[in-house]
Amino acid sequence: MCDDGEVTHPPTSPEPPTPPSQGWIATTSAGSAVLDRAGADPAGVLLAADLDGTLAPIVENPDDAAVLPRARAALERLNGRAGTLAVITGRPVRRACEMLRTDRPGLGRIVILGQYGVESFEAATGELRVPEAPPAVARARALLADAVARIAVTDPATAGTMIEVKGGAVALHTRRAADPALAWHLLAPRARAVGEDLGLYIEEGREVVELTAWHTDKSDALQRLIDRARPSTVIMCGDDLGDLPAMRLVAERIEGGGAGARVVSWSAEQPSMRRHADVLCDSPQGVSQFLEELAGRMGKDDGSPEE
Ligand SMILES: [Mg+2]
């Protein structure tokens, strides 16, 4: 499914181990070393995390997604300890801010890169950057809405397919359709065709086709953070194919002798992702536990607020 040529385990090696329930396990030497490396130089740590499926459990309706309180608490402990604390997501940055509750205390240094880095929010300065979407995005939304409505007439089991508009992108979600597989079979090709006709970029994830105005991926976003911070350790947490470009950057750093880890929130829906892990977590709960232990290595808890 994500055969990108990267080989992280020799073909003769056994399948990577499965993480304990709601826990995590290191699957490479880089993963085994990352807590010690981070603890040795907390200010040199760049920690970046995806949102959905990584800090927030995947739910049927994307509007209902929420960051786990445990994940939020772990991020608070990392805020002020990690040199750079970032979230990189396909979500619009304003929605990501809502999900992370950046209006509340505790994440005063977080950087949020929305729409794969097109949009940004810097908590330290309050600067919000949201470029205006081009007309092709509204046109794509109208065409997709029309396609969904027409196919629901001939194939009622596709009812429940959703269209999400988010700034410079429009996404087709088949997760909530009465028959998600049928909806995907009938509507994903239509979405791809709309994207091609309108000159939009096409990104695909778990039961979602996203048409976006700007060609950027999470590696661009992560590279910007790396260029700015010059970190000694880079940790990227993610769960889906859209996280792989950023994880590839981390893998290249590790191959070059640098410190870091690809932290994968593993799910049955994207089983191949575990081939890309240095640290394999069981769901966002497992990621939360990893982040808690990372924070513990990077400083003492003295009860004082960290802004
Ligand atoms: Mg995700």
Image (cartoon, grey):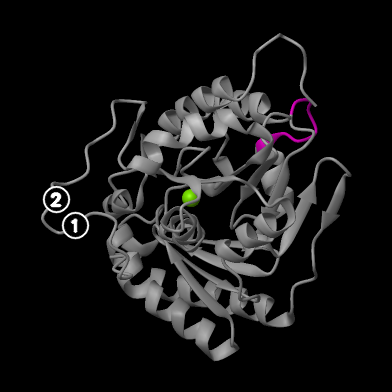
Q: What amino acid is labelled 2 in the image?
A: Ser
Percent coordinates x, y for residue 214 in the rendering: 65, 75
Q: Which residue is farthest left? A: 12
Checking the image for residue 218, the label placed there is none
Residue range (magenta)? 100-106
Q: Quadrant of residue 27?
A: top left
Q: Position of residue 153 (x, y in %)?
A: 39, 71
Circle on res. 10: 1
The amino acid beneath tag 1 is: Pro
Picture residue at 87% right of the left edge, 44% below the top: 126
Q: Residues within 10 Å of mark 2 (few under 14, many from 20)?
A: few
- Residue 282, image x, y percentages: 35, 34
* Residue closest to the far bottom: 197
Residue sticking out furthest to the front:
257
Q: Is mark 1 on a helix, strand or loop?
A: loop
The verdict on residue 17 being magenta is: no
Location of mark 2 (residue) = 13
Location of residue 172 in the rendering, given as x and y in whole percent from the top left corner: 49, 65
Q: Is residue 175 above or below residue 30?
A: below
| Observer-nearest of 155 and 59 | 59
Whether the residue carrying mark 2 lies under 8 Å from ligand 1 is answered with no
Q: How crowded is mark 1: few (under 14 residues within 10 Å), some or many (20 or more)?
A: few
Q: Which residue is drawn at 77% across and 17% down?
A: 305
Cβ atoms at labels 1 and 2 below 8 Å apart: yes
Mark 2 element type: loop
